[in-house]
Amino acid sequence: MWLLLAFLSATLLGFYDSFKKKALHDNAVIPILFLNTVFSSLIFLPFIFLSSSTRILEGSIFFVSQGGWEVHRFILLKSLIVLSSWIFGYFAMKHLPLTIVGPINATRPVMVLVGALLVFGERLNGWQWIGVALAVVSFLLLSKSGRKEGINFKHNKWIYFLVFAALLGAISGLYDKYLMASPQNGGVGIDRMMVQSWYNIYQMGMMGSVTLLLWWPTRKRTTPFHWDWTVVLISLFLCVADFVYFYALSLPGAMISIISMIRRGSVLVSFLFGALFFHEKNLKAKAFDLALVLLGMIFLYIGSR
């Protein structure tokens, strides 16, 4: 069951990236991101309300536990990290081909692994080092593919935005490990549903401020905003993908190493969207680069067993 849910989460994430690309086409980034946080918050607000005022959800997977500032301060930091990653990532997604964004995003497990090496003092074995090496080689080959489309990885600021987004995403993954771990294991021990519900609320407040203070006064001098129904789909697919992921982890026998690797398979869906619907170029070379990334993920999984 948890294996099927992992594949479902990966598929939903792939659609999320594809809808995001569609919504950002010739559109203003900041209001799109703000609306994403609004719709995501609207999805989780009923769960927060019902959990705090009734006993309907008690004992279910939808129950949101309560906590004071000593807990919410950690979720607030989580919101800041994720939102920073999204801001960089959304701008990169708008200006770069989906077939380049996907493979680079797929290297996040490598960044998490290196982060664990530096932060938690974990050691990599031979299999994991091979996975890291393949990810580095795939990045170099991807830069060669990008050059054919006039995208110089050394001088293109959107590539740096994408790398910053991936790095912050990796930091978020490491921080999740700390948030979810029990106090006995050196963590905070926060309920997953509480984190997922409240960090969306905090992000909405942050993005509301950014939209009002930075985008609204300059909206007539920048790319205009136009409504696209894929904005709703972005929020829906992301929330369901994350919820399915967390639920899969809670099932007996679930292995986080396998689930995390399968989730990176979302890049296959977004790559297909880039090829079939956005008609992107140099697909053969990029497909080879993508295959190296996925092979690297397999080596990381073997090394983590």
Image (spheres, rainbow, N blue to C red):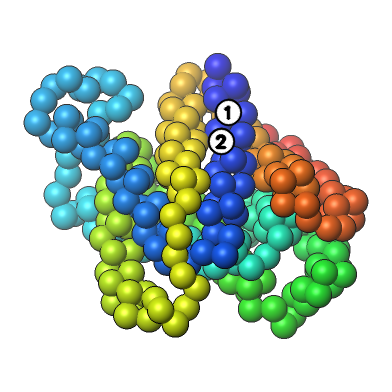
Please state, as top left, top right, bottom left or bottom right, where the N terminus lies in the image.
Answer: top right
Query: Is there any visible trace of residue 81 in the rendered image?
Result: no
Q: Nearer the viewer, residue 227 or 59?
A: 227
Label 1 belongs to which residue? 8
Image-based side of 238 in relation to 290, left or right: left
Residue 77 place in picture, x, y as percent:
33, 61
Q: Which mark is residue 88?
A: none
Estimate the spatial distance between the alpha carbons at disc 2 and disc 1, rounded to whole Å.
6 Å
Q: Amino acid at mark 2?
A: Leu
Query: Is there any visible trace of residue 16 in the rendered image?
Result: yes
Q: Nearer the viewer, residue 68 or 60?
A: 60
Residue 180 place in picture, x, y as percent:
38, 43
Q: Residues within 10 Å of mark 1 (few under 14, many from 20)?
A: some
Quadrant of res 31: bottom left
Image-based side of 132 in relation to 34, left or right: right
Q: Residue at x 58, y 71 (%)?
A: 161
Direction top: furthest residue:
1
Classify mark 2: helix, strand or loop: helix
Direction right: furthest residue:
284
Classify mark 1: helix, strand or loop: helix
Please state, as top left, top right, bottom left or bottom right, where the C terminus lies in the image.
Answer: top right
Residue 63 place in picture, x, y as percent:
25, 28
Q: Residue at x 61, y 34 (%)?
A: 11
Q: Amino acid at mark 1?
A: Leu
Q: Residue at x 78, y 47 (%)?
A: 275
Pointers 2 and 1 in contact (CB under 8 A)?
Answer: yes
Q: Which mark is residue 12?
A: 2
Vertical position of residue 232 compared to residue 107: above or below: above
